[in-house]
Image (spheres, grey):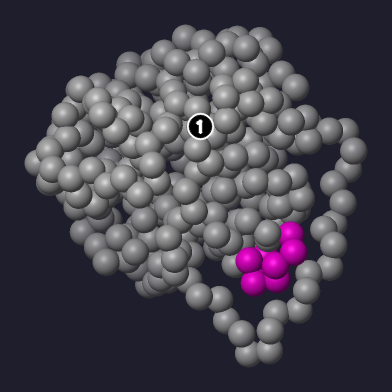
Amino acid sequence: MTVDDATSDLQRALDALTSTAPLEAPPPLPAAPAGGTAALSGDAIADAPTQQSTAAADVRLTGPLDEAWLELWYRPKIDLRQKCLAGAEAIARIRHPELGVLSPENYLPGADHDSLTRLMASALRKSLDDWSIFSESGFNLRLAINIPVKLLFDLPIIALVSERRPSAEHWPGLIVGVTEDQFVRDAKRLRDIADELRAAGVAVAIDDFGAGYSSFSAMRELTFAEIKINRSFVQQCTTDATNAAICQTAIDLAHRFGSTAVADGIENISDLQTLQIMGCDFGQGALLAPPMTKERFIELLRQRVSKPRVPRAVSLEDSEPSSSRLSA
């Protein structure tokens, strides 16, 4: 997929989101198999490859990671209610001198702990610095970045945030995502650090919801910013009764906890519209835009902004962060 394809994909999705035609109810769902249950497991489906990412899917990098290889790519997050760009997820990628661009699944499993810790510290600093660059383009985006729980405990994260936190009054804060299985295993310990993070302007989100296993008792231990629904359930939620039920449950659960729901892996208009009808707050996926380099993301912002301005200040207590509208 070329960068022009990325722009057109985003434009098509936004055209659908901003259409004046009323949303229609999705077609009736097929009945679930008698006695059938959903298996809440499985690996996340990889993103569609982009022209900049040419590394083979089976490449696994092992050993030390050089911080000079680090790049932050950004996946846009669309507000499905206000029909505008609301934020972006920062993805730490490695541009290896021989293997090309590697996604986290290609380097995380084999990386040594020390270099991975340094890499994630650098990624955190870069994401905080990048917010100011996006803000200068007229977008007050609430950025998110995933950090493994173990590294979250090991990193001097409060000091890092204090050191690089933007000074602008309208900074909406940062979201740190942890996967559901990690969250459940370390809920009480995570709660303690989450309280400190919140005071520094950082909120915690539950990533890949539905992919592992959930514990409602563990969820009561932590105030989280959002639940991101695993893409394996988002895809075909229009036609698959089990996927639809899981998506709706996750959305309702997020709202009952005073949080927001993010659908990951949206690939077609029908699923997008179904998620809107379900009340999902935000969406990400190939239909909207693939992950892209920071430079391409900035170019996209500048192309699509209608009226650049400094948005209002937003507190972490806001259920929906400040958004900046894209022209459709």
Vertical placement of residue 267 versus 26, above or below? above
Residue at 46% x, 40% y: name it.
317
Residue 221 horizontal/vertical position (percent)? 33, 63
Residue 64 or 126: which is nearer the viewer? 64
Considering every residue shown, the one lying at the far left of the view is 114
Q: Which residues are magenta?
A: 238-245
Vertical placement of residue 310 versus 276, above or below? above
Residue at 58% x, 61% y: name it.
233
Residue 252 or 145: which is nearer the viewer? 145
Name the element at disc 1.
loop
| Number of residues whose C-alpha sits closer than 10 Å to that of mark 1, classed few (under 14), some (14–19) or many (20 or more) | some
Vertical placement of residue 278 versus 20, above or below? below
Considering every residue shown, the one lying at the far right of the view is 21
The N terminus: image quadrant: top right
Magenta residue check for 243: yes
Residue 142 can be seen, yes or no? no
Tell how many labels.
Answer: 1
In the rendered structure, the answer to whether residue 227 lies left or right of residue 162 reads right
Vertical placement of residue 249 versus 89, above or below? below
Residue 36 horizontal/vertical position (percent)? 61, 85
Magenta residue check for 22: no
Residue 270 or 130: which is nearer the viewer? 270
Q: Disc 1 marks which residue?
A: 50
Residue 127 horizontal/vertical position (percent)? 34, 26
In the rendered structure, the answer to whether residue 85 lies left or right of residue 178 reads right
Residue at 31% x, 45% y: name it.
59
The amino acid sitting under disc 1 is Thr
Residue at 32% x, 60% y: name it.
183
Residue 104 horizontal/vertical position (percent)? 33, 43
The C terminus: image quadrant: top right
